[in-house]
Image (cartoon, rainbow, N blue to C red):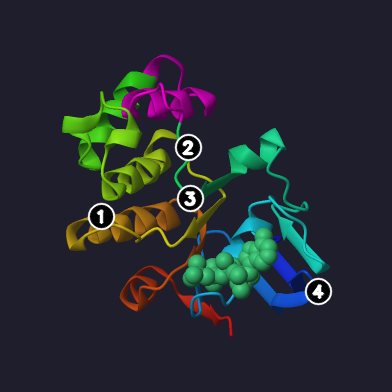
């Protein structure tokens, strides 16, 4: 079967300076690949490329058999991306998650699905607040809850999902990633957390 993600000879430059690559990646369904590297080594750049937000200067990337394109509806159905938190200022936590659930086909089951995700992600006391009023950690948990309100993605691209999370929340993050992999989701995890990478991934690539 074709891998969920391949990258061949990917290079990115900004202002003529090479900030990433050349890098090759290969990730099969249900696989977990950790991307490690110091600040500025290009992890977020790689995530943006795999998430279809920018094209590399050199090399090729394929996600589910096609070049990644964030604007493509099918791509957004196949790929879950967690990076910077972005919110609608007028919607509550629950409404954000309902929007995601409905967008991914939950129909009349959206409210129940969201209720369970909110409980599991420790958002129960905050579900009717605007995310902008929450701590960064709770905002991060809301982003993670997005994994629970949609059918399993073919690929999850996670950029430092551990940021702002305390120990218990990191444990929940690890469990959610493990569950996603068991359901067949391939996981690309850019992280500074070695313990998390060890626990939830079976391969790693180091950017320098
Ligand atoms: N849009 C941009 N224009 C110019 N330079 C950029 C741009 N985005 C990133 N860079 C530079 O590219 C390099 C890689 O940045 P990137 O954010 O990918 O690193 P990172 O490994 O994710 O770092 P961190 O762990 O701090 O998030 C850095 O030197 C950064 O300053």
In front of the other: 37 or 1: 37
Sequence order check, earlier mark of 4 and 1 = 4
Disc nearest the viewer among 3 and 1: 3
Q: Tell me the element at label 4.
A: loop
Find residue 151 and name its label: 2
Residue underneath mark 1: 172
Q: Residue furthest top?
A: 108
**Are the residues at dot 4 and dot 1 in contact (C-beta closer than 8 Å)?**
no
Left or right, 146 with reference to 79: left
Find residue 84 and name its label: 3
Q: Is mark 4 within 8 Å of ligand 1?
A: no
Sequence order check, earlier mark of 3 and 2 = 3
Disc nearest the viewer among 4 and 1: 4
Q: Is mark 2 within 8 Å of ligand 1?
A: no
Residue 160: x and y in percent read 43, 62
Q: Quadrant of residue 61?
A: bottom right
Sequence order check, earlier mark of 3 and 1 = 3
Start-end of magenta stretch = 88-109
């Amino acid at each position: 079967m074709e891998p969920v993600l391949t990258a061949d000879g990917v290079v990115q430059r900004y202002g003529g300076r090479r900030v990433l690559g050349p890098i090759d990646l290969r990730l099969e369904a249900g696989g977990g690949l950790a991307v490690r590297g110091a600040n500025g080594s290009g992890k977020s750049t790689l995530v943006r490329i795999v998430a279809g937000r920018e094209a590399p200067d050199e090399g090729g990337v394929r996600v589910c058999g096609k070049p990644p394109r964030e604007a493509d509806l099918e791509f957004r159905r196949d790929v879950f991306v967690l990076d910077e938190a972005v919110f609608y200022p007028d919607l509550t936590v629950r409404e954000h998650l309902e929007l995601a659930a409905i967008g991914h086909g939950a129909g009349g089951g959206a409210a129940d699905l969201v209720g369970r995700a909110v409980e599991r992600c420790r958002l129960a006391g905050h579900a009717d607040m605007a995310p902008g009023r929450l701590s960064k950690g709770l905002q991060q948990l809301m982003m993670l809850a997005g994994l629970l309100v949609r059918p399993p993605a073919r690929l999850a691209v996670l950029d430092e999902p551990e940021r702002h999370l305390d120990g218990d929340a990191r444990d929940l993050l690890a469990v959610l990633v493990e569950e996603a992999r068991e359901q067949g989701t391939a996981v690309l995890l850019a992280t500074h957390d070695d313990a998390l990478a060890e626990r939830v991934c079976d391969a790693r690539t180091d950017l320098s």
